[in-house]
Image (tube, rainbow, N blue to C red):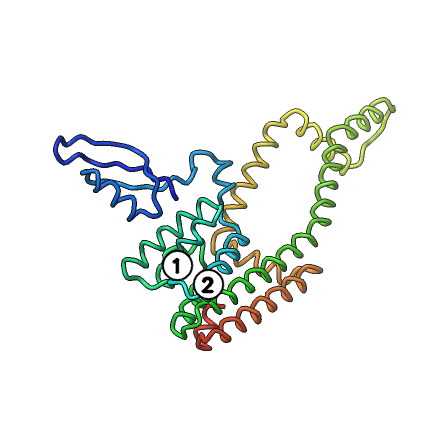
Amino acid sequence: MIAFKVEARNTKTGEKIRSEVQADSEQSAAKLIKAQGLVPVSIKAQTGDSNPFERFKNRIASKDKVLFSRQLSTLINAGLPLVQSLRNVQGQTQNKSLQIVIGRIISDVEAGSSFSASLSRYPKVFNEVFVSLVAAGEVSGTLDKALVRIADQQEKDAEIMSKIRGAMVYPVVVIAVMTAVVGFMVITVMPQVEQIYKDLPGANLPVITKILLAVSHFARDFWWIVIIAIILIIFFSNRWAHSIGGKRFFDRFKMRAPLIGPLFMKVYMARITRTGTTLVGSGVPLLQMLQIV
């Protein structure tokens, strides 16, 4: 069951009423409101967005979608109708956000939409590969097998990403330690070196040393400007990295960079071939498979 925030109007008095309703879907919540002699104005599922920790907790991870695919495949293979299978999976799902999405899919399917069309309304949850495999399974009558292929595909992708993250831990730690050491040298060690040279009569410091001392003075005296500059650089770099030009730049860098370039190329080729094999094996035409991949 999902909790819905409901705004309704009393047809007799015109009074606006706000309440909470427990139902399987928005359509079921609307029926409950109408049964009380009220006209629903708005029905919104409670997703815990007011609490950022709750939102992170209830995000739909790959393992949730894998479990959804396998459970739904098992139920359909056992001969249960699609809507009943979806209701059973919804009841077994612990993730509240996924429960809400499944409830909306149930409403769409009951209204006459195909399962794949209902999934395509939630691209942030079900990507194009997921939707295409389901559509191919619906046409061929092998939806249960298509869902198993989807689960296998997602598990393999998650395994590869886990290995990549594990391989990147060591260089990230090394870079972080080097940055901390440089910061410590600039803020703590350089002023002591400057004091030593000041005590020496007629000491003429090299240009590079003078530049380092100037950086050290600036970092110590205007540390708040340094912090603000770092935050702004990270913010705007992140914004640019998500733009079309930024994505193109970083994708080219990842494929051409020394050491990590060959790794990323192998990962991309493995994902292309595996995803293509899964799509073709499910009956997706070759040209459509290439477009999806």
Q: Which mark is residue 32?
A: none
Say left or right for 97 vs 40.
Answer: right
Ranked by sequence position, the earlier of labels 2 and 1 is 1
Classify mark 1: residues with Cα within 10 Å, few (<14), some (14-19) or many (20+). Answer: many
Task: Locate residue 139, reporting x and y percent.
Answer: 38, 73
> Is residue 284 or residue 1 the one in the foreground?
1
> Is residue 269 or residue 139 the one in the foreground?
139
Q: Residue at x 85, y 25 (%)?
A: 196
Say left or right for 20 vs 125.
Answer: left
Pointer 2: what residue? 130
Task: Locate residue 179, reporting x and y percent.
Answer: 71, 40
Occupied quadrant, residue 217: top right
Q: Residue at x 61, y 32 (%)?
A: 226
Total labels drawn = 2
Secondary structure type for disc 1? helix
Pointer 1: what residue? 119
Say left or right for 259 vs 60.
Answer: right
